[in-house]
């Protein structure tokens, strides 16, 4: 079913795709973080226990967790990291591509400015 759902959206993959699995977790707050390299540019809460909720500011511990995680591994220079609270502490829910992620209550102007600076720096090098 997952493959068919993805394929119907025009995306294809085969048995060589890397997949990470985890035991089910109880999720509390979830945050969306826009990242450039190891830096959190802006963030927003977006869910509480699976329900849309954008009212909680991003705690410093979440920002620190995201930056420490990005220092270990990141999918690209510009990306989105979703982080959540679990019974076992903070965890990465997923990494998303920058150009297909909702902003929720993130500071869009700050994100666009910082990503633009990064892209310009690539061409000025």
Image (tube, rainbow, N blue to C red):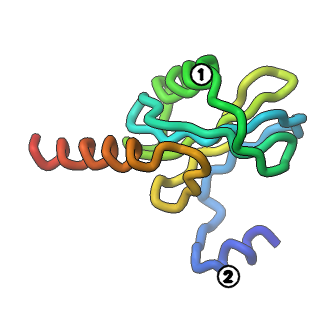
Q: Is residue 89 above or below residue 36?
A: above
**Residue 65 — which label?**
1
In the image, is 67 to the left or to the right of 1? left
Q: Give x and y (percent) for residue 21.
A: 76, 43
Task: Label 1: state its secondary structure.
Answer: helix
Q: Is residue 64 above or below residue 38?
A: above
Residue shown at 72% from the left, 25% from the top? 90
How dense is the environment of label 1, judged by Cα within 10 Å: few (below 14), some, or many (20 and up)?
Answer: some
In the image, is 118 to the left or to the right of 71? left
Q: Give x and y (percent) for residue 17.
A: 61, 57
Q: Is residue 73 above or below residue 11?
A: above
Is 12 in front, or is 54? 54
Residue shown at 47% from the left, 31% from the top? 40
Q: Quadrant of residue 1?
A: bottom right
Q: Give x and y (percent) for residue 47.
A: 76, 44
In the image, is 101 to the left or to the right of 108? right
In the image, is 104 to the left or to the right of 23? left
Q: Give x and y (percent) for residue 122.
A: 19, 45
Task: Label 2: state its secondary structure.
Answer: helix
Quadrant containing the C terminus is top left
Lower position in the chain sequence, tag 1 or tag 2: 2
Reading the image, the residue beneath label 2 is: 8
Q: Residue furthest left?
A: 124
């Amino acid at each position: 079913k997952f493959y068919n759902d993805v394929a119907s959206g025009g995306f294809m993959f085969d048995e060589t795709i890397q997949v990470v699995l985890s035991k089910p977790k109880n999720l509390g707050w979830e945050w969306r973080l826009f990242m450039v390299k190891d830096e959190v540019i802006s963030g927003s809460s977006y869910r509480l226990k699976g329900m849309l909720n954008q009212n909680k500011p991003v705690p410093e511990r979440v920002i620190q967790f995201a930056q420490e995680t990005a220092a270990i591994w990141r999918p690209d220079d510009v990306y989105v990291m979703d982080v959540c609270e679990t019974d076992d502490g903070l965890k990465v829910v997923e990494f998303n591509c920058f150009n297909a992620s909702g902003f929720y209550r993130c500071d869009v102007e700050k994100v666009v400015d910082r990503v633009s600076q990064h892209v310009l720096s690539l061409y000025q090098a």
